[in-house]
Amino acid sequence: MTIFDKIRRTLQELGVSDAQGVESLFAELRKAAEHERAELVAGGAPQQAERDGLCKALRDRWLARKGGFLSQVDENWLKPASKELKPVVGKQFNKLRRFTASLEFEKLVEALPFQQETAPQMELPLGSGAGRPVPRDLTLPGLRRPLGSIHPVTRMQREIEDIFLRLGFWIESGPEIESTYYNFDALNIPESHPSRDDWDTLYIDSKTVLRTHTSPVQIRAMEKYGAPLYIIIPGKCYRHDNPDSTHSPMFHQIEGLAIDEDITFADLKGTLDFFAKMLFGEKVRTRFQPSFFPFTEPSGEVAVSCFVCDGQGCRVCKESGWIELMGCGMVHPQVLRNGGIDPEKYSGWAFGLGVDRFAMVKYDINDIQLFFQGDVRFLEQF
Ligand code: DAH
């Protein structure tokens, strides 16, 4: 008979008639409570919601007013106990109540991650003088560590990187704290340009900024490697933006840059069309529209036909049939010169895209803030 069968009977039915018998019954019950708690902590229900549910279920199992184990003990052991046994049972019952309260079933949800962090405890190296080892119950089940998952922005970034790596590009990076020279001047962005204003850019001092885009790494890479050059540059960028569902003061970009002899706009179109088909499916079409960036001439905006509705108009493309992907253009001759490359010999194309925006479109997420709040209930869906 398990302890849970025993609490459905009276002490008389169980043939328990002395203090010792009562005490050992209660001891058995406390042990069971402790064991169930340990099992839950170790149990590795990976989903937060599932864990919440399990913790609540454990609480109800023991403490529910109707039919909980403690109320069964009250009904079947305490109330019908004989006059002589009642003080012992009462005392034990109070002890059990304090004990189950101390197990904090409901707070287990919060306790779980910390348990995972600190346990199993490492044995201290011999001679570290850290005192006696803590006795541990080695028969308890082990602690399962929940596996993390790849952050959706990282996942998107890797997917994009993979496509360009296959085309022979390599990955370059540069500093997030950047000089105004690389972030602006070398890219043909004049002193009077609005993006240089305090309201758009986070300045460290008058000559140093948190980079507002990944484009400065174009110049750094030209200086470092010269031509020919085929690179993509993923990284974090920063702007003086108030957080809302489409803006974040920190966000991610990927820059592309191809410099070689005889590079033309046709190479740009062909590469980006291939990229869009790899990422969104064979049947998508790309659209190039004229635009302006100080560091490219001519400049363009690339859109892709909506991969959900095939251009018919839906929620994802905001009924337009098209999804804006990125800015691009032929590298301005002055920018090549600033990077130490002879524009008479070499030409190049470049693009810049927002990784967070790509991830929002691809995974149908309507609030960019979700990426950066660190809520596991959001993150564990990926
Ligand atoms: N740096 C631009 C931005 O942050 C994006 C961009 C547009 C990058 C065109 C490029 C490009 O390399 O050719 O808005």
Image: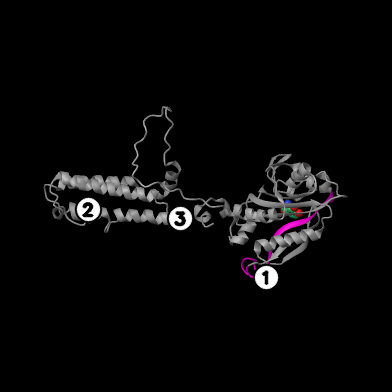
Mark 2 burial class by Cα count in 10 Å: few <14, some 14-19, many 20+: many
Q: Which residue is mark 2?
A: 73
The stretch in magenta equals 308-333
Q: Which residue is mark 1?
A: 311
Q: Residue 51: image x %, image y %?
A: 41, 54
Q: Quadrant of residue 330?
A: bottom right
Mark 1 burial class by Cα count in 10 Å: few <14, some 14-19, many 20+: some
Q: Secondary structure at mark 3?
A: loop
Q: Residue furthest bottom?
A: 312
Q: Residue 361: image x %, image y %?
A: 62, 61
Q: Write the residue at 41% across / 27% down.
A: 129
Q: Amino acid at mark 2?
A: Val
Q: Which residue is mark 3?
A: 47
Q: Secondary structure at mark 1?
A: loop
Residue 54 visible to an observer of this rendering = yes
If the image is split into quadrants, where does the N terminus sit? bottom left
Residue 93 visible to an observer of this rendering = no
Q: Nearer the viewer, residue 58 or 15?
A: 15
If the image is split into quadrants, where does the C terminus sit? bottom right
Q: CA distance from mark 2 to mark 3?
A: 33 Å
Q: Write the residue at 80% across / 53% down.
A: 348
Q: CA distance from mark 2 to mark 1?
A: 67 Å
Number of labelled discs? 3
Ranked by sequence position, the earlier of labels 2 and 1 is 2
Q: Is residue 313 magenta?
A: yes
- Mark 3 C-beta to ligand 1 under 8 Å: no
